[in-house]
Image: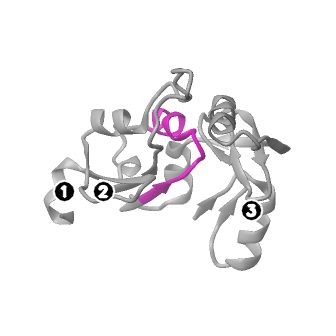
Amino acid sequence: MNVEANPDLAQSFLYLRPEMATLNMAVGKPDEFVTIQIMGEDSSSTVNPGFEDYLHKSRPGLRATKNYTVPSISIKEICERYFYRRPIFISLDIEGNEGVGLENNDWNNPKCRPDVWMVEVFDKKVDPDGKRYNASLPEDILSQNGYKPLPGNFPHEIVYVEEKVFDKYQ
């Protein structure tokens, strides 16, 4: 399953991976419409307005060149509607909105608690002015809900494993 907010990329996924279910939606709060900002030629994008400012300060030439309004869906809704059993692994890369996505998960529902999350995070939790671009940090949310980071992660992705199965994945 692929959830892609950028309509252009969603169409590419439908063409290149016809066997995969693709939703042209943003991951975040349920039943909302959000604006996805596409920045520059490299298709960097975000649905988090503060994150665009954060990116612009680190890469001054980067600004939104296209905006689309798309519906939003929560992780809880994805797990309940599209998975007939609990997923074992979820990769979450939603361009600076990971905290919002995780905040809107139902942590008490076993179907919404995979063994493993791979979550995109950034080295800097604040922009150059000291302002946090994301109110909730994925690392904090996952830790508070019983997940531990695996050692030796990728530069911008951290793999978190549920504590009760952590030894199985080391």
Q: Which residue is mark 2?
A: 115
How packed mark 3 is, by other alpha carbons closer than 10 Å (few <14, some 14-19, many 20 or more), is some
Residue where numbered disc 1 is placed: 165
Q: Which residue is located at x 64 percent, y 78 percent?
A: 19
Q: Can residue 112 be seen here?
A: yes
Relative side of 105 to 81, left or right: left
Q: Which residues are magenta?
A: 90-105
Q: In the image, 67: left or right of 84?
A: right
Neighbour tally class for label 2: few under 14, some 14-19, many 20 plus, Cα within 10 Å? many
Q: Residue flagged by tag 3: what amino acid is it? A: Ala
Q: Residue at x 54, y 52 (%)?
A: 93
What's the distance in space between the residues labelled 3 and 2, CA to CA? 27 Å
Which x, y percent locates residue 24?
73, 55
Dot 3 and dot 1 residues touching (CB under 8 Å) = no
Describe the colour scheme in one phrase: one colour
Please give left or right for residue 36 compared with residue 119 in the image: right
> Of callouts 3 and 1, which one flags the residue occurring earlier in the amino acid sequence?
3
Secondary structure of residue under mark 3 = helix
Q: Quadrant of residue 90?
A: bottom left
Calculate the distance from the C-alpha at mark 1 to the C-alpha at mark 2: 7 Å
Q: Which percent across, then down, holds residue 142? A: 34, 40
Q: Amino acid at mark 1?
A: Val
Callout 1 secondary element = helix
**Residue 152 versus residue 82: which sits nearer the camera?**
152
Identity, as a three-letter code, of the amino acid under mark 2: Asp
Percent across and percent down for residue 54 are: 62, 33
> Can residue 93 be found in the magenta stretch?
yes
Q: Residue at x 46, y 28 (%)?
A: 136
Q: Is the residue under label 2 in contact with that under label 1 (CB below 8 Å)?
A: yes
Q: Secondary structure at mark 2?
A: loop
